[in-house]
Image (spheres, rainbow, N blue to C red):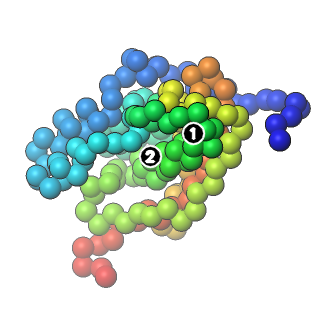
Amino acid sequence: VSEDGFEHQAPMPDVPGPADLEDDSVKQRKMMERAPEEVRKMMSRPRPIEMRSVGPSVWSKGPKPAENSVWFRATAPIGADPHMHQGIMAYASDMNMLSTAMRPHRVEWQTPGLQSASLDHAMWFHKPSNFNEWHLYHQDSPSASGGRGFVRGSIYDQKGDLVASVTQEGLIRLRKPDAK
């Protein structure tokens, strides 16, 4: 039951808005121009979530800070049910989490021998929101060790209200080509 009470929140990071950023799928298509046909076909399929990364994308080379911000929203109308908005936001919250923990280590999803898997994922909804509208998903990874990466996420609506918080720990490791 929603009720009045104490309120505070971490401020939303000051980043460019979604209208000032290129859609990640456009960047991805440019990167995939020289990829094998099978990879291009898989990577160019329609996506249910539109994303616009702030700063260096996951596809840029070299180490990056262990934090990431991306604007995201559903690509198709969800309807009026607030639980459906939360469910689709929960689905979308898994995107980019582990890549945030990989950013400092010069690895990306296409790195040969990379193994990754979500081990746990928790989410807390603080306020109702409309996931047909843009939301800023700010993530940071304070720790990676022992073949695992830990990531925290904060999801803000465009007004700056913190609407959800996320944590995830995942397997991230490189296997040598001859290892089984």
Could you tell whether 70 is left or right of 42 in the image? right
Residue underneath mark 2 = 96
Q: Quadrant of the N terminus?
A: top right
Kind of residue at disc 2:
Asn
User: Where on the picture, by quarter, is residue 119?
Assistant: bottom right
Seen at 11% across and 52% down, the residue is: 37
The numbered dot on residue 130 is none
User: Where on the picture, by quarter, is residue 12?
Assistant: top right
Seen at 61% across and 47% down, the residue is: 166
Q: What separation in Å lies between label 2 and label 1 (alpha carbons)?
A: 19 Å
User: Where on the picture, by quarter, is residue 157?
Assistant: top right
User: Is disc 1 surrounded by few (<14), some (14 to 19) or many (20+) residues within 10 Å?
Assistant: many
Q: Secondary structure at mark 2?
A: loop
User: Is disc 2 surrounded by few (<14), some (14 to 19) or many (20+) residues within 10 Å?
Assistant: some
Kind of residue at disc 1:
His
Residue underneath mark 1 = 85
